[in-house]
Amino acid sequence: MARTLLGALLNRAATATTPVPFASRSQTYGRGFLGSSRGVEGQMRAMTATGTLFAIVDRTSSATALVDWKLWRKAKSGRAEDRIEVTSHAALDLWNKPNAFMPRQEFVETQQQHFDLTGEAWWVIARANGAKVPLEMWPVRPDRMTPVPSRETFLAGYIYTSPDGEQVPLGLDEVIQIRRPNPLDPYRGLSPVLSILPDLDTARYAAEWSRNFFVNSAQPGGLIQVDDRLSDDEFDELRTRWNEQHKGVVNAHRVAILEQGTWIDRTISQRDMQFVELRGATSDAVREGYGISKTAIGDFEDINRASALAAKAWFAEQQTVPRLERIKGALNNDLLPMFGATTTGLEFDYETPTPPDPEIEAQQLTARANAAAALRTAGWEAAGVLSAVGLPEIAYVGSPAAPAPDTSLSDWQNSVAGLLGGDFEAAQRWVAVEHDDDHTCGPCREVAGKTYKNRAEAYADYPDGGGYKDCVGAKYGNPCRGHVEKRGRKGEGS
């Protein structure tokens, strides 16, 4: 039976003898500007610092988690369209259900939150005793993971710190790390939060100042000046009576009566602080740190269908796809090899999140169809033309047969019907021309004026265009004088 991660870590902790390595520098940053923690835990807590940061992380992690994944067997041609989907494999089962408590969507969303906030995501692999095949995967908080550097092999393993402080050593085959490279630390990731900490602090303190402004009667503070020094009892009584009568929004604008002392108003005001502009600038700085636009988090000022589709495509290409590529690399380079030879030639790949552009698709389809028609006209085999221009294969049944004329209609009606159907060759375009005199035989006289819809039918009665096939004179050595002519668009001979 597979071990759960909690049980596995507790068991490892009970017998752990490996000393705890030095803490990585990116985990021991000091206090940031205005007091925010620069540590990994502080970076994760920053998600609730401002609504803008929460919206960005929530949108990117949700979009990444909603994308579907498939397991493929690579084609010898190397082309993605020639791959064969694998629908049954232990690796696919693990990815769809990483552990007993969360589906793939929740797993991906959790690890993506870690990555977007700290620049790194950690997957811990659990196996059954003595087994090599992974049975569970868990997303682990980055602040609980510490790499163990090695002078010989660069990385010796990892240390997991449990909530109760236990130090659990983990091997290289038990951990998968996804990280944004840190130029100062090759073992840890780099968080965008570190670049916007001053802005997050400013936003937090601005919000607290604004809140206190309303709590304290929605008026800026001031001073009560007394001429004589107050005793402790007099000071406490004055402060208590003032708070009871004037503190709070419900007591705003009440008239103050001072038995001793003078009220001195402060010159600074909420308007002077320009908090609306300040908080707007903070939101801009947070979006800049994550390279994301207003429309990507639902802030639409001027939107129509075209701009909405463009914004959706931009978000998928610039935000979701890079995140998916990192996950794809971890799956194919780290997870699949853990399943041994059964994964040779297999690869995970995601369904593209980029929405199709109807106009571009129509233009591409038209261009490919025209290219296929040109190749076919040039004499190339029909069976290979479609694949050559990137169109799906369609069974080739030859040129469509022309419909038989409706004998219940007049020649004029058949012509009009053919033209309205868009097939000009289907109109009655050929006519039998015969000499009508004493030397004309009966069959030729009867066929005179007959119309045909195409050259093939006309030549069936008049081989090579001249001489009616049933002419009586021709049978006795007298050549037939009749022939067929192609008529003009309006029925005139041509």
Image: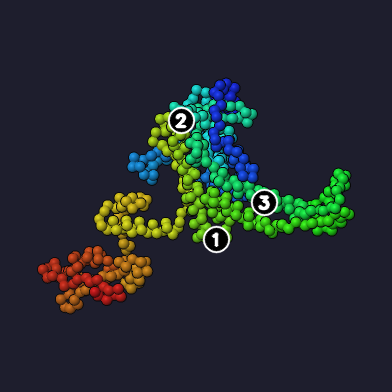
The amino acid beneath tag 1 is Ile
Asked whether the beta carbons under mark 2 and mark 3 sit within 8 Å of each other, the answer is: no
In space, the residues marked 1 and 2 are separated at their CA atoms by 51 Å
Q: Characterize the local packing of mark 3: few (<14), some (14-19) or many (20 or more) Cα atoms within 10 angstroms.
A: some
- Residue of label 1: 303
Q: What residue lies at 27% left-to-right and 66% top-to-bottom? A: 454
Task: Classify residue 71 as left or right of residue 293.
Answer: left
Task: Classify residue 487 as left or right of residue 203.
Answer: left
Element under label 2? strand
Answer with mark 2 or mark 3, whichever residue precedes in sequence. 2
In space, the residues marked 2 and 3 are separated at their CA atoms by 45 Å
Q: Quadrant of the N terminus?
A: top right
Circle number at residue 154? 2
Element under label 3? helix
Hey, which quadrant is residue 294 in on the image?
Answer: bottom right
The amino acid beneath tag 3 is Ala
Answer with mark 3 or mark 1, whichever residue precedes in sequence. 3
Query: How far across and down, in percent of the image, does residue 472 sit?
Result: 16, 69
User: Which marked residue is nearer to the observer: mark 1 or mark 2?
Assistant: 2
Q: Characterize the local packing of mark 1: few (<14), some (14-19) or many (20 or more) Cα atoms within 10 angstroms.
A: few
The amino acid beneath tag 2 is Phe
Answer with mark 1 or mark 2, whichever residue precedes in sequence. 2
Q: What residue lies at 73% left-to-right and 58% top-to-bottom? A: 267
- Residue of label 3: 206
The answer to whether residue 66 shows anywhere in this view is: no
Q: What residue lies at 33% left-to-right and 53% top-to-bottom? A: 389
Task: Classify residue 151 as left or right of residue 382.
Answer: right
